[in-house]
Amino acid sequence: LSARRELPDAGPRPNAAQFKQLVVSALRELHGEVGAALPVDVLTYEEKTLSAILRVISSGLVKLWSALTLLGSYQNRRCAFRVLQTSPFLLALSGNSRELAL
């Protein structure tokens, strides 16, 4: 799952550990302790663009996606996640096919 977190204003940006905690918190908020126990790996995280590639088992994709897209704030500031791409193959997430030039 490739996701981007968007903040409407400039401010403190979470580091990789804070981003992972934000994902776990979003899962806990929507799905309780069962959701928080879902194994999610942050494979890449770009603090400058707030973009990440997350790995989750296929049965947990809907829980992760819903938790991220329904999250509305971070540190009392409005925010939103946008899922850019999903794939059962990690290699497919390493690039954006929309940006390829032929």
Image (spheres, grey):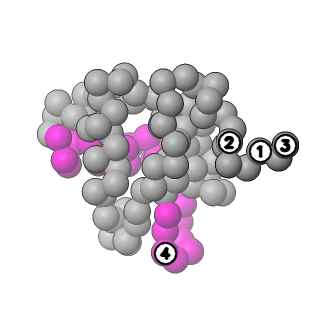
Asked whether residue 84 is drawn in magenta, I would say no
Q: Is residue 7 above or below residue 71?
A: below
Count of marks, rendered view: 4
Placement of the C terminus among the 4 image quadrants: top right
User: Is any part of residue 75 visible from this angle?
Assistant: no
Q: Is residue 101 left or right of residue 60?
A: right
Q: CA distance from mark 1 to mark 4?
A: 28 Å
Q: Name the residue that disc number 2 marks.
A: 97
Q: From the image, give the main secondary structure of the stretch colored magenta.
A: helix
Q: Is residue 92 left or right of residue 67?
A: right
Q: Name the residue that disc number 3 marks.
A: 102
Q: Is residue 30 above or below residue 55?
A: below
Report the mark closest to the observer, 2 or 4. 2
Query: Residue at horizontal 26%, vertical 38%?
Result: 63
Q: Is residue 33 left or right of residue 100?
A: left
Which residue occupies the foreground of this view, 94 or 16? 94
Q: Which residues are magenta?
A: 6-31
Report the mark closest to the observer, 3 or 1. 3
Query: Residue at horizontal 33%, vertical 70%?
Result: 76
Where disc 2 sits, the SS reads: helix
User: Is any part of residue 74 visible from this angle?
Assistant: yes
Q: CA distance from mark 2 to mark 4?
A: 27 Å
Where disc 4 sits, the SS reads: loop
Q: Is residue 43 left or right of residue 55?
A: right
Numbered mark located on residue 8 in the image? 4
